[in-house]
Amino acid sequence: MEGLRLALQTRLGERMVSMSSTLVETVSINYEDFNESFLTCGTCLCMYDGGEHTPKLLPCSHTVCLHCLTRIAASQTRDTGSFRCPICRELINIPRGGVSALPPSFLVNQLLDLMSRQRREVIPKCSVHINQELLFCETCDTVFCTLCTGGSHSTTATSCEHTIIPFSIAIKRMSEILLYKANECISKLTQAQDTVAQELHRLERATEHCMDHVNRTFADASTLLEQRRQEMVTAVGQACEEKRKVLEEQLALIEGEKNKVERECEGLQYQVEVRNITQRIGSLSEKLDAAGMLGEPRENAFLTCDFSHNDSLATLQGALAVMGRVRTSTTFPSLCTTQLTGSGLAVAQLETTAVLSTVDYHGNPRTSGGDPVAVEVLHVDDSEAGGEALPTELNDCDDGTYHIKFRPSTPGRYCLKVTVFERPIKDCPLFFDVTEHNNPVAIYGCRGSGKDEFLQPVAVAVDDEGLVYVVDTGNSRIKVLTQNLEFVRHIENKGLTGRSCTGIAISSNGLVVVNWRTKTVTEMSTQGETVSSFSHNAFQEPIDVAVDKSYGHILVADNGLSCVFVFDSDGKVLFQVGKKGSQKGYFNLISSVTVGPSGEIIVADSRIQVFSAKGDFLEELYPEGKGRGRYGGVVVDGHGHIVATRSEKNRNYVQVLKFAGGTPVSIIDSHDSRLKRPSGMGVTADYHVIVVDLGNDCVKKYRYW
């Protein structure tokens, strides 16, 4: 009970100005502090009452409850009939009748009566039992008195199922909760007020910036117009000056001729010699003819400005009509969301895309872009959102969505922060994990000879249309699949017979395959019709084929001679690359051959070696793999990467290297779908690789960049 007032009156026994004066001093004490200080036994810390804890006044002026005095007297008196005060340790004699005969503490009893009256004024009584104070059940949220108690409610403060407290405490708790909630609400509203005011200030600054931009732009336009006006004025002046010069020169010439005639006519009346007169008459006749020529102006006065020779005015008007635009946005950042595309999993070294979807205040999707979006991707640990930011690319799709692209360099925990108008979006920051495991996005085939089955698939090629051609060696056919590894048809040809076709490549006429048993190279259409076929006397074990479309060359890798033969389109051998050996430029058990972006000849055994289009050795890639394993297939994409399958002891994977220098980029470990004897491969234009998994008689598709 806040603000309990104790009035202590002290009457002064003197008169001031013949009047008696009364001085009243008022002290404001907290209710709980008052109870603890004055109405609580200092020994057992229980509230004084009229029963077991009746306050008793000791001769030393201290007050102790009857319960404590009884206990103390029983333990200390023995034969002495006295005990010591538990507060000041003064010896107290027990009166006849025992400790209960000690006088009551009248001051404490009066204070208890005062408190009781004050409480009765504040705490409502039960409407049924008027003299009973109300209790409150926190479990049931119910108000009742002790006489109303029933069911699971007990008169004790707490039970195993319900928590019962005095109504005064409940009121105080509710008041505290109400005050706390009110303060929280006020704090939130104040924060909202500051945020909205700050946004209003930003709006004013943005408006000023737009006004300045408009004024500067149109000032620049006015400058350009004034510059053009000056150019036109200068052109008019120059044209006028040129015409003026010609006409003034003609006037000067006429004036000169006129003066000559006047001089010749002077003294003509005094001439008496006919011959001289006749000569002058002839001269004047000539001048008269010349005067007729001078009478026609050599230049005209035509001078005009033409603005109708083209549609420049209309163009200018149209350009001014669409010059500039005022853009606003109804995007509400707190409702905008972002999520990772695909399965929501990010793989190290692979480009990851997150899509930001914007909505307005009512949650309706936005249909236009142009919002100022800020993006940050951080590599963090599990405890704090701090770390090194990754390079990001933001693409505005102009339909209310934005694509955020980034490439995690290493596995671990990452954090994506997105803000619109410098305000965070919903669930920002977004935490996600990046794994090192690159699993296939599609798998096709199993062992067998049916439509969807393989028997010893060894090689694959992908054409410009995205069709996938897999050499199904054990079934002596080529299986044609879509880029999504869906069955299309089978191709059969004489060059595929004998279950010994081991290489395939795309040519300008269709497909080229090599058969190690028949030692023939066959070119066929994509429907299986033979275009041409050739062999070579030196062939011992031709195992792979590649086509250089730029030169029309056909490259055949022969494991018997450990070399690569280069043929023209007619099957005529041009030159040979390499021979058996382990040094640079030599081969040991060739597994694959392919062509680089500039016609380079790329050969793989336990390492990868690069030769020029003419067969000159250039470089050796991944030499540390020499003797530790073997490549199964190798291919070069159009983006400067070499992708190769590799088998080592208890480990099969796909390796991605930079073509320039052979720097390793990433590893495809196929963690959830282990590769077993990976061999031939082909790449698509959208950074996917199709891998033949010979040990599992299937093909698998992976994203590698």
Image (tube, rainbow, N blue to C red):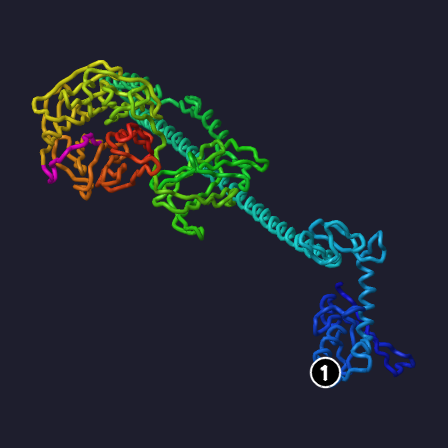
Q: Position of residue 234 (x, y in %)?
A: 39, 33
Residue farthest to the front?
79
Q: Image point 81% across, 69% down: which residue? A: 50
Q: Position of residue 63 (x, y in %)?
A: 76, 77
- Give the residue pinned by disc 1: 78
Residue farthest to the right?
18
Q: Position of residue 700 (x, y in %)?
A: 32, 30
Quarter assignment of residue 691: top left
Say which quadrant the N terminus sits in: bottom right
Q: Image point 57% across, 35% down: which residue? A: 363
Q: Position of residue 551 (x, y in %)?
A: 17, 24
Dominant secondary structure, magenta: loop
Residue stretch in magenta: 581-596
Magenta highlight on residue 588: yes
Magenta highlight on residue 130: no
Q: Is residue 236 left or right of residue 274?
A: right
Residue farthest to the top?
529
Residue 463 appearing in the image: no
Residue in front for this viewpoint, 206 or 271: 206
